[in-house]
Image: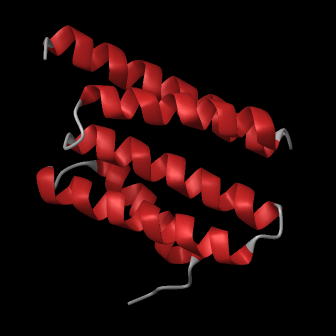
């Protein structure tokens, strides 16, 4: 893929994820889900096994976990957080210096009270 296209997908993805998080924080869960879906599409457009795309997918899963928790769906919350951790770990396997993936993984572990 053209490197400029990869950067464009990354930028769009992170902007959509940020908007989704902002929507979640303002209580507009449906808008958050919409923007997270767009971010996930952009992440998949990069390449399924791109370290940055995997970190982005991790943040989307984490935010979906937050939404599920706010909606009182505990089982879905746990599932989404576990999915987020998997994406962050996979991202770190590809790029061990990915600070975003480390940060996201740490946030997931703290939320799940996994201190090991």
Question: Can you name the residue that lies furthest to the bottom here?
Answer: 116
Q: Nearer the viewer, residue 65 or 22?
A: 65
Left or right: where 12 falls relative to 43:
right
**What residue is at 31 percent from the left and 38 percent from the top?**
53
In the image shown, does 73 or 19 lie closer to the viewer?
73
Q: Where is residue 88 in the image (x, y as percent from the top left)?
A: 33, 58
Q: Give x and y (percent) for residue 116.
A: 38, 90
The N terminus sits in image quarter: top left
Q: In which quarter of the image is residue 24?
A: top right
Q: Position of residue 30 (x, y in %)?
A: 78, 38
Rendered view: 15 above or below 68? above
Residue at 76% x, 70% y is 73
Between 5 and 73, the one nearer to me in the picture: 73
Q: Please state if 2 lies on the left or on the right of 11 as rendered.
A: left
Q: Residue at x 40, y 42 (%)?
A: 56
Residue at 55% across, 57% down:
62
Q: Is residue 115 left or right of residue 63?
A: left
On the image, the x and y values in percent for residue 74 come to 72, 76
Residue 27 to residue 6: above or below: below
Placement of 7 over or under 108, stated as above or below: above
């Amino acid at each position: 893929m053209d490197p400029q296209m990869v950067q464009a997908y990354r930028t769009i993805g992170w902007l959509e994820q940020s908007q989704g998080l902002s929507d979640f924080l303002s209580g507009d869960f449906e808008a958050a889900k919409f923007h997270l879906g767009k971010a996930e599409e952009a992440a998949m457009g990069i390449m399924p096994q791109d370290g940055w795309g995997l970190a982005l997918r991790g943040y989307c899963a984490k935010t979906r976990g937050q939404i599920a928790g706010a909606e009182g769906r505990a089982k879905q919350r746990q599932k989404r957080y576990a999915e987020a951790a998997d994406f962050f770990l996979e991202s770190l396997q590809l790029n061990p210096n990915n600070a975003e993936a480390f940060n996201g993984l740490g946030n997931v572990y703290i939320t799940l009270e996994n201190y090991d």
